[in-house]
Amino acid sequence: MEMSMKTMEGMIKDLQSELEKMKSSGNSFDNKRWATSNKRNKECFNCGKLGHFRAECRNPSRRDTTRRLLTNRSQNQNAKSRVSIIDTILNKRSCKLLVDTGATLSIVAFKLDESLPKHCKVELYETSQNITSANGGLLTLYGKGYFSIQIGKESFKLEALVADIKAEGILGLDFLKANKCVLDVVSEKLFLGESEIQLIFEGPLGCYRVVSSETVSIPPSSEVVINGKVCFPGGYNLNSFEGVIDHRKTMRKTMDL
């Protein structure tokens, strides 16, 4: 009798042990099945495809791809950010005028006005208008005049301010709107009456010095937001801007970064 009781106790213990093993193996199987199911139903945060997680993704990191796209877009925009110019004749003098939809008034450069022959000069009238330049300062004005301008086969009267500017002149919104000009940047043409004027894109790409406003220690392989300013020729600084400075391999070698 005692022998049979011991035998039964041993069998019960063996059964309990087997049940524990089956239970643990079942949980492991369920976990694996849940992980596999979860992979199938969840999309990767990097590439957006189903079947794997971001840590297992073989595609390039979305952050790196976005950064490359932004860099390429910035480079493409810079390559196209040249001024549009048209060939004109102003008071029988050939010149190039900047077509600027951001300028509300038309301007003739003082140096161009001074270079006109005496019989081609116009009388300048005093003006109380002020013009703010791109750097925030006021332009030096010499008055307002009425010029004769020929664009293509069309001739017009141009009311313009005479000021110190680098360009020979600017055709502003006042002239473009009054003469119903159509500026087609896709075909790079200016439609004016029956004339079709080819736009000329000129101007060097800007490359300016960027200076940190404070001393900053940047750890390796890190990105830090800092205060800085862009230094333009002539002593003008741009103190408020947002941008990304991406160091290159050549720069790392040069600056020992």
Image (cartoon, rainbow, N blue to C red):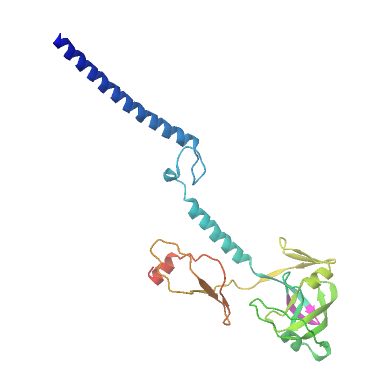
Which part of the image, by quadrant, shows the N terminus? top left
User: Which residue: 84% across, 70% down?
Assistant: 178
**Which of the pair 163/118 is nearer the observer?**
163
Q: Is residue 42 left or right of residue 117?
A: left
Tell me which corner region of the image, top left, top right, bottom left or bottom right, holds residue 23: top left
User: Which residue: 37% across, 70% down?
Assistant: 256
Tell me which corner region of the image, top left, top right, bottom left or bottom right, holds residue 145: bottom right
Q: How many labels does the image show?
A: 0
* 203 vs 37: above or below: below
**Which of the pair 168/242 is nearer the observer?**
242
Q: Where is residue 33 in the image (x, y as percent from the top left)?
A: 41, 30
Magenta-colored stretch includes residue 91: yes
* 17 vs 60: above or below: above
User: Which residue: 42% across, 34% down?
Assistant: 35
Q: Position of residue 156 (x, y in %)?
A: 85, 75
Q: In terms of secondary structure, what is the magenta stretch mainly?
A: strand
Q: In this view, does 47 lie to the left or right of 160?
A: left
Residue furthest to the top? 1
Which stretch appears magenta?
89-97
**Which of the pair 140/6 is nearer the observer?**
6
Q: Position of residue 56 (x, y in %)?
A: 42, 43
Q: Where is residue 235 in the image (x, y as percent from the top left)?
A: 56, 82
User: Which residue: 45% across, 32% down?
Assistant: 37
